[in-house]
Amino acid sequence: MSYRLEYAASARRDLKRLDFGVAARVIQALERLATSNRGDVARLTDVNPPEYRLRVGDWRVRFERNDLTRTITVLRVLPRGDAYR
């Protein structure tokens, strides 16, 4: 069962600022997550509603996952040092 990907405005802005190669790797990792639920994913603690992060090299993708509607909403794509602030 695959999930549908949705991008918040902030995530689209983040992706546009990335180098083309990095953006392609991030999008490929997100598509892999959506179709096969594979990737380096961890649930973030002390965040409500629950958020998750996907690690793609030195970049972190913050997202929300809704199992009822089968959607993944990408919130931000940030360098590792800025992703958890």
Image (tube, rainbow, N blue to C red):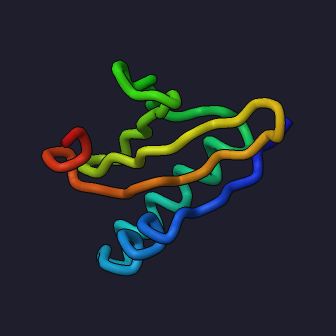
Residue under the image location 36 percent in, 19 percent down: 45
The one nearer the camera, 54 or 70, is 70
Furthest residue toward left: 81
The one nearer the camera, 16 or 22, is 16
Residue under the image location 33 percent in, 46 percent down: 60
Left or right relative to 32: residue 18: left
Q: Tell me: residue 51, above or below residue 56.
A: above
The one nearer the camera, 33 or 43, is 43
Furthest residue toward front: 48
Q: Tell me: residue 16, above or below residue 76.
A: below
Furthest residue toward top: 45
Quadrant of the rendering where the N terminus is positioned: top right
Residue under the image location 60 percent in, 51 percent down: 73
Give the image location of residue 53, x and y in percent: 42, 36
Left or right relative to 20: residue 63: right
Give the image location of residue 9, x and y in percent: 49, 71
Quadrant of the rendering where the C terminus is positioned: top left
Left or right relative to 34: residue 69: right
Residue under the image location 65 percent in, 59 percent down: 6
Number of numbered labels in the structure image: 0
Choose top left, top right, bottom left or bottom right for residue 65: top right
Give the image location of residue 75, x and y in percent: 47, 54
The one nearer the camera, 38 or 10, is 10
